[in-house]
Amino acid sequence: MNPMPLWKRVLILLVCAWGIIAAVPNLNYTNVEKHNDAATAIDAAGGTATAEQSADLALWPNFLPSNLVNLGLDLRGGAHLLAEVRVEDVYKARMDALWPEVRDALRDLRDQVGNVRRQPSPEGTLRVAISNPAGLTAALDAINDLATPVVSLTGVGQNDLAVSVEGEEIVIQLSDAEKTATDNRTIQQSLEIIRRRVDEVGTREPTIQRQGEDRVLIQVPGIGSAAELKALIGTTAKLTFNPVVGRTTDAGANPGARNQLLPAMGEPGVYYIIEETPVVTGEELTDAQPAFDQNNRPAVNFRFNPSGARKFGDYTAANIGAPFAIVLDDEVISAPVIQSHIPGGSGIITGSFSVEESTQLAVLLRAGALPAEMNFLEERTIGPELGQDSIDAGKIAAIISMCAVVFFMWASYGLFGFFANIALAINMALIFGALSTVGGTLTLPGIAGIVLTIGMAVDANVLVFERIREELRSARSAGRAIELGYEKAKSAIVDANITTFITAVVLFAVGTGPVRGFAITLGIGIITSVFTALFVTRIFVELWFNRARPKTITV
Amino acid sequence: MAWRLRLVPETTNIDFFRWQWLTFGGSMFLSVVAIIAWVFMGLNFGIDFKGGTTIRTESTQAVDVGGYRAALEGLPLGDVVITEVFDPTFGDDQNVAMVRISAQEGSEAITPETITAVEAALKAHDPALTIASVESVGPKVSGELIWAAVLSMVAATGCILIYIWLRFEWQYSVGAVAALVHDVFITIGIFAVFQIKFDLTVIAALLTILGYSINDTVVVFDRLRENLMKYKTMPLRDVMNLTVNETLSRTLMTSGTTLIALIAMLVFGGDVIRGFVFAITVGIVLGTYSSVYVAKNMVLMIGLDRSEKKKSGTPDEFANIDA
């Protein structure tokens, strides 16, 4: 029989070698995990390692790959929450804040519009009645002047307020474009706050992501319970504006009476000495938005409520040229210098920001407390013992099924079965290698998916071997029979596996959590088992056949 | 000649249509029974689809269902179902129970206060008790999950139908989908009759059955297509019989290895995943059966157009439009 071209053989063997090397770290899971944690910690500390970290780092050599299969919550234990953010809360707050502005604007037009009253209205809308209907147009103009263009990609050219007239009353609400933009901001802000809260407890690899329009999925491995997680998220961030006394790089510096020494965020080794009593606190901040200053550099706009505005105005008037610190959870976010007296309660923070940084800072500034309340729609807590039990059970099942299948194949196809068994082992390595490399998550149904793959992986081999048997019966030469076997079995193998792959794709698309984990292992398993059956087993068969040159073969 | 394990003799000549009224008819009958069971007995939906909370407890003390119920009596929980879980993988001092609480008012999952209260009540009854897991799904999400599950089944079946249609002919598509529907419905029927918990993972299992069953059917169809070219004059029924006989050894080998793996998982894989593995196991037995006894019978009933067809893609195909 004609062997495959050399490049093809080299390529196949390289893929196998890659799979085995990429899968190896998973055999030594705990040590590699320690190694990775130590490496991240050392990186974060700027290259300095403690003795313990160095010891952990030495547990696994640096030149080997260290990507691991992520264990899903159902295997590792932890908490899962699906929360719905009540974005409407924000509409209501916006409208309530808008009412004084509308009132003031219309008061200036009193001779045209008469008296102005707020009418009862559903949350998120503002109904205003004026006593002189003749001034309706003037009133609408005045209200429309309060509107500002929406800042978002899709909402270009639209204003943030939708003003309409119903009977004698003016109805004001957020425009659809602004609602979308606001929803996005609200969710983003919620995600940011949740991330900060969760990061504070320092657990490994939390998943915090947006799901659909207004939902947030939070998965935290290793946390005791979902209730604990809820409590953690509910805690509000503490934001203050404090006068700066000095700046130092000495972590042990004595700040002096009624002062505090706080680290600077994003600048390792830098500390600020600030006065303990804040000028204003975040509770008095009403809004913060990314913006640009007069020189077109990224900056952040912020606004205080009236009492905060007064305090802030007085302080800035008296301290032009002095720095003041923006402190979040005992960390100095930035310490800008006051350029001028800031009356009116709104100001701009400039600094050497990139656009991303200014956006981030705006989010953090707003992130004092969650912008809207959350409803928890789904929650799951899995204890660590249960997860470990599942891993152990899955391991036992996988080993037993592997042994049984290996014996079955060997008994049925002899030497060819032995080749298929080696391919099965390589197949397992490839699955784990691929899962580690793409950062896939192994869940309990995922383990079942792997066990199922063990059973089904030999299918392609069985198809080929049965076909070779048939070709041998029609009295062909051994070499030709093997070639024809592979050739003719190919269409059945490909069609059968593509249909199974379709279901894996559908599972991945509609499934969530554990089901998605199953879809990933099933999908990867299909690809690797076709690969091993059509190419890897074939290489073994060819090598053996071309070396031994048997006259007759028995499959 | 070396010894080989043989599941079937080298050549078989079984008439798979002989007991057609029993095999195919029986399958159709069972599908109908399954649907009736499904409609009238209903499925034992897990919290994924119904909403509510399940709490898994573990203790070194024996599970005392009555005592647990008495301990929870005073709490405002609505329906409470307590069951003891038995599993061969549990150790001697591992006693597991599931406490299931019906969905509470509103769209939210259970409140932390309720869970704390339940935990405290159970611990007061049995100090050695620990909570291994708590899962709670609000009614809003559970409604969406049902919808997503139905959608995924329909989407997967539709995609398979189209793929088979493109690769083979439409008659094959109908046969394949009939076999799929047969497998899935009977599996659902079994879940209804035995009132086994039906949750999101069972849906994943059903989708896997779709994938496996179609895999089996396609292998038979692929050979059928090949044989139809080879034996142009042989009656369709005989070609089909030949095809199934030729592929029988492979069909049983593959199902055999897969079943070995699944049975290992069923016995040693632990109780958390048992419903999932059980569904797949049932589905694979059915899938093997249906590719032999259902899919091709459908094709035979519809009939195939065996007239010499011109290869597609040649200009001739469009030549006689007005003929």
Image: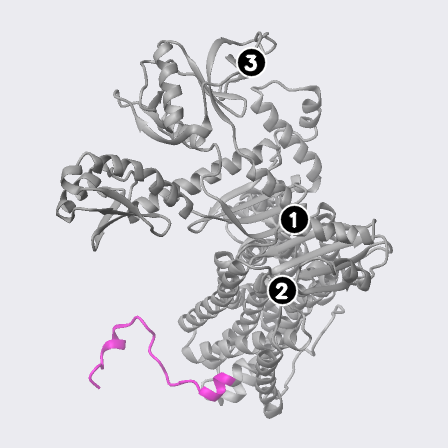
* Crowd rating for badge 2 (residues with CA inside 10 Å; few <14, some 14–19, many 20+): many
Mark 3 and mark 2: Cα distance apart in space: 54 Å
Q: Which colour scheme is used?
A: one colour
Q: Which amino acid does label 3 sit on?
A: Leu
On-image quarter of the C terminus of chain A = bottom right
Neighbourhood count class around disc 1 (C-alpha, 10 Å): few under 14, some 14–19, many 20 upward: few
**Mark toward the viewer: 1 or 2:** 1
Q: Could you tell me which chain the residue with mark 2 belongs to? A: B
Say if the magenta span includes residue B149: no
What's the CA distance linking mark 1 and mark 2?
A: 23 Å
Q: Residue at x 35, y 41 (%)?
A: A96
What is the CA distance from the residue labelled 3 to the residue labelled 1?
A: 39 Å
**Percent of width and height locating residue B7:** 71, 74
Whether residue A56 is situated above or below residue B187 in the rendered picture: above
User: Mark 3 falls on what kind of element?
Assistant: strand
Residue numbers of the magenta segment: B298-323
Q: Nearer the viewer, residue A2 or A223?
A: A223
- Quick check: B113 left or right of B312? right
Q: Residues within 10 Å of mark 3 (few under 14, many from 20)?
A: many
Give the residue at mark 3.
Answer: A261
Q: Which SS does the magenta portion mostly show?
A: loop
Viewer-proximal residue, A467 or A317? A317
Q: Does B123 sit above or below residue A281?
A: below
| Residue B46 - label | 2
Which residue position is annotated with label 1? B113
